[in-house]
């Protein structure tokens, strides 16, 4: 049976442990082997003479390399203790390039990264931003703001806006439903009633408009994602798409929110523009499937 491989980006900082923990739980649940990867600077040879000012720089690089080695070792031990096949490798180079090269080399079906925003802010780090746009396989952005998500990693909330990119996300989830025991739910967000019906105090018209929108969306969801239980089709009403999806994920105890994206364009252009960027920087684990990089089948 084909063994799925996930490449997991590990740094030497505080984010290493939660990212590793999430990857291990996902691997236990879905069935992955893990390849933990750290990318860093080349460590100067201790025998090379350096000017006084450069000596401290060499020491810092060596200290970072040692912290990375320990982080990798701890991640591998954590995975093996949980019964997950794993290995750890240190590479020299820029993190996005190294992670994507490792994913290509081992035929990874998934690349797992943390948000790594500056000082814990709800923004994406440059590594995460770039791999989301260019990785050769789907990318999972682990999040530490939703510990309850790890209890339901077989339940995926697939966001669908009736585009080709969303079709790619659904097809990826469908393969895991067949082969990995995933329970996918599919969701579409509609805005709350607004405009003339509300302004003119016509609640019956607003209610009719709301009901028609929800019925149309539900019918389209059943068309693009047939064969699910009736309760797995979600029409979410929210003025903010990202917030609506996160609340739906929390309410329905989904382990992941899954979205599709287009090509290698700027992250701000994927699935409803800033929605996906906000989801990736937000509190819930996010799986991004580019239409041109769906990874190997289970």
Image (spheres, rainbow, N blue to C red):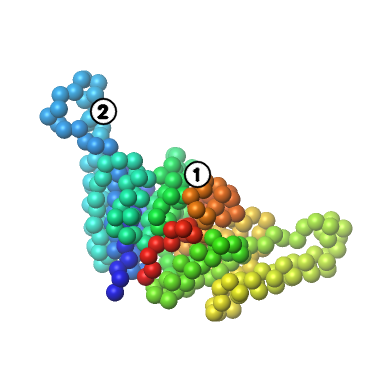
Give above or below for 296 relative to 134: below
Residue 297: image x %, image y %?
38, 68
Left or right, 147 with respect to 6, comes to right
- Which residue in the protein does label 1 denote? 123
At a point 50% along the width and 64% down the height, the residue shown is 168
The disc placed on residue 67 is: none
Q: Is label 2 in a helix, a strand or a loop?
A: helix
Number of labels in the image equals 2
Q: Residue at x 39, y 73 (%)?
A: 180
The percent position of residue 59, horizontal first and vertical second, equals 22, 31
Give the crowd class for mark 1: few <14, some 14-19, many >=20 residues within 10 Å. Answer: some
Looking at the image, the residue that sits furthest to the right is: 200
Q: In the rendered image, which residue does mark 2 sit on?
A: 57
Q: Are marks 2 and 1 in contact (CB under 8 Å)?
A: no
Q: Height in image: 169 above or below 58?
A: below
Residue 229 location (% of width, % of height): 55, 79
Which quadrant of the rendered structure holds the N terminus? bottom left
């Amino acid at each position: 049976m084909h063994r799925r491989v996930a490449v997991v980006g590990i740094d030497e900082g505080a984010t290493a442990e939660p990212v590793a923990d999430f990857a291990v739980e996902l691997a236990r649940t879905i069935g992955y082997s893990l390849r933990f990867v750290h990318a860093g600077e080349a460590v100067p040879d201790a025998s090379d003479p350096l000017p006084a000012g450069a000596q401290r720089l060499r020491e810092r690089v060596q200290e970072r390399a040692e912290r990375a080695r320990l982080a990798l070792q701890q991640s591998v031990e954590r995975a093996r203790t949980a019964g997950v096949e794993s290995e750890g490798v240190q590479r020299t180079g820029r993190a996005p390039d190294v992670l994507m090269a490792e994913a290509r080399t081992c035929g990874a079906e998934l690349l797992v990264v943390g948000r790594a925003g500056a000082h814990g802010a709800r923004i994406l780090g440059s590594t995460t931003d770039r791999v989301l746009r260019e990785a050769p396989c789907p990318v999972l952005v682990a999040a530490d703001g939703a510990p309850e998500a790890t209890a339901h990693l077989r339940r995926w909330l697939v966001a669908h806006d009736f585009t080709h990119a969303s079709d790619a996300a659904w097809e990826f989830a469908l393969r895991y439903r067949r082969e990995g025991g995933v329970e996918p739910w599919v969701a579409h967000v509609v805005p709350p009633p607004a405009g003339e019906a509300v302004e003119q105090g016509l609640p019956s018209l607003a209610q009719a408009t709301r009901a028609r929108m929800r019925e149309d969306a539900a019918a389209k969801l059943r068309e693009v994602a047939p064969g699910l239980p009736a309760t797995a089709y979600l029409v979410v009403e929210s003025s903010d798409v990202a917030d609506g999806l996160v609340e739906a994920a929390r309410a329905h105890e989904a382990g992941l929110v899954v979205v599709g994206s287009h090509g290698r364009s700027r992250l701000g252009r994927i699935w409803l523009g800033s929605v996906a960027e906000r989801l990736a920087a937000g509190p819930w684990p996010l799986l991004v499937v580019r239409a041109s990089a769906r990874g190997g089948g289970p």
